[in-house]
Amino acid sequence: MKNWSIDSWRAFPIKQQPNYSDKEKLNSVDASLRSLPPLVSPNEVRMLKRELALASQGKAFLLQGGDCAESFAEFNEVNLRDFFRVILQMTVALMYGAGVPVVKVGRIAGQFSKPRSDDMETIDGKSLPSYRGDMVNAIDFEDDSRLPDPERLLKVYYQSTSTLNFLRSLAAGGYASLRQISRWNMDFVDASQQGKLFRELVESINETLSFMEACGLKLDDMEQLSQASFYTSHEALLLNYEESLTRRDENDGKYYVGSAHMLWIGDRTRSPEEAHVEFLRGIANPVGVKVGPSMKKDDLLKLCDVLNPENEHGRLTLISRMGSKIDDVLPSLVEAVKDAGKNVVWSCDPMHGNTIKSPSGIKTRKFIDILGEVKSFFAIHKSLGTFAGGVHFEMTGQDVTECLGGAQAISELNLADRYHTHCDPRLNASQSLELAFLISEELKKIK
């Protein structure tokens, strides 16, 4: 990469960074991270890139989902297993509609920081630094809690390591086997309409597996049926953390960020003249860019050139997050990318453009708005002859009440019942599976 080095980003303007008061402590933490092993391997990263290359050609579909912002408080075995179970359920529903492999990428094992609209938060006349995720400070509105603490970077590393190890054990240890599909449901989902649909799908799959066994096939020996590939991703916000976990691979000489398989840049930090784009342009991991309603065609094409100069399939994912402006803004952007011959995965994030406040002041999202943006996304790509390559959700396996509507008919009166998010509202397990089945129907229309 011309004029790129692992720390060249430090010479560029940078946004959305915490103001650490103890620089020596920060440098010490960075040094500790540089001495620790990476969480993911270059070979795993290359495997993801190959799968995303299929998605860019309409031969696979990207499912990317997880917490708005991971927290230290909600880290436990049950929450991780429930998250993975919902991802598997959604995968089966999407495969049923798409008829192609589903690339499973979690917003997990590193998604601990969040960009903020304001540096300061004021409550009852008192102003403190904004909460920027557990990677930076604590959510409690107290002086000491809101001070950015570099030691949190190490806690993120160790929690991410544990998370990834556990998810790998589920993916490769038999839990993800289609032979176990009947055990994937959860009580509160099982009683719902989408739970009934999933049971019907399970029965169909089990009949197919029984037929295959009757034909003499040894299903337990077939890796495709007994294991699941699963990858991690997060927004690359704190670049000192990402730099400290970047390693040069001896096999191909390229630099791989070892904190996750895939990284993305947010809509606030996507300027080609700033540090985040500078850092991500030089790494070999697949990268994503959030594409909001303020994006211009020329700016998007420039980002494609900077982040994917060799125009590789699977290298770049463009994550649309338009809200109600999708029909007015997205078609011209998709057409410009198509006309320029850029090889990208187009994915839809229907969450971030649809955040509202309820009359009681609680931040939420309406299921009907989320579904509406997804439907528009598919319709736009169908009309232009391009591939609707994936979806990007903020979701959880927990039975939370953070988004309005869906088959559960969560109302404003229910929002406070189980509102657990540390940042933005998430789809719960039932809403996530419901959405997967609705997307499955959209995918059938474009086969």
Image (cartoon, helix red, strand yellow):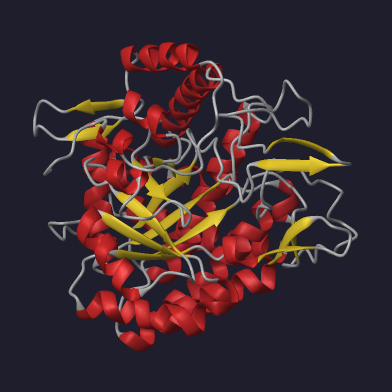
Q: Residue at x 67, y 38 (%)?
A: 130
Quarter of the figure with residue 307: bottom left
Q: Position of residue 340 (x, y in %)?
A: 19, 76
Q: Residue at x 63, y 48 (%)?
A: 185
Q: Is residue 172 above or below residue 61?
A: above
Q: Residue at x 58, y 52 (%)?
A: 394
Total residue callouts: 0
Nearer to us in this view, 10 or 218 = 10
Nearer to us in this view, 80 or 307 = 307
Q: Is residue 223 visible?
A: yes
Q: Residue at x 26, y 68 (%)?
A: 301
Q: Is residue 200 visible?
A: no
Q: Position of residue 46 (x, y in %)?
A: 21, 42
Horizontal side of residue 22 vs 177, given as left or right: right
Q: Is residue 397 above or below residue 79?
A: below
Q: Position of residue 405 (x, y in %)?
A: 75, 67
Q: Is residue 15 above or below residue 342?
A: above
- The quadrant of the image that shows the C terminus is bottom left
Q: Looking at this rendering, what residue extends furthest in the bottom direction?
A: 383
Q: Position of residue 174 (x, y in %)?
A: 43, 34
- The quadrant of the image that shows the N terminus is top left
Nearer to us in this view, 139 or 50 = 139
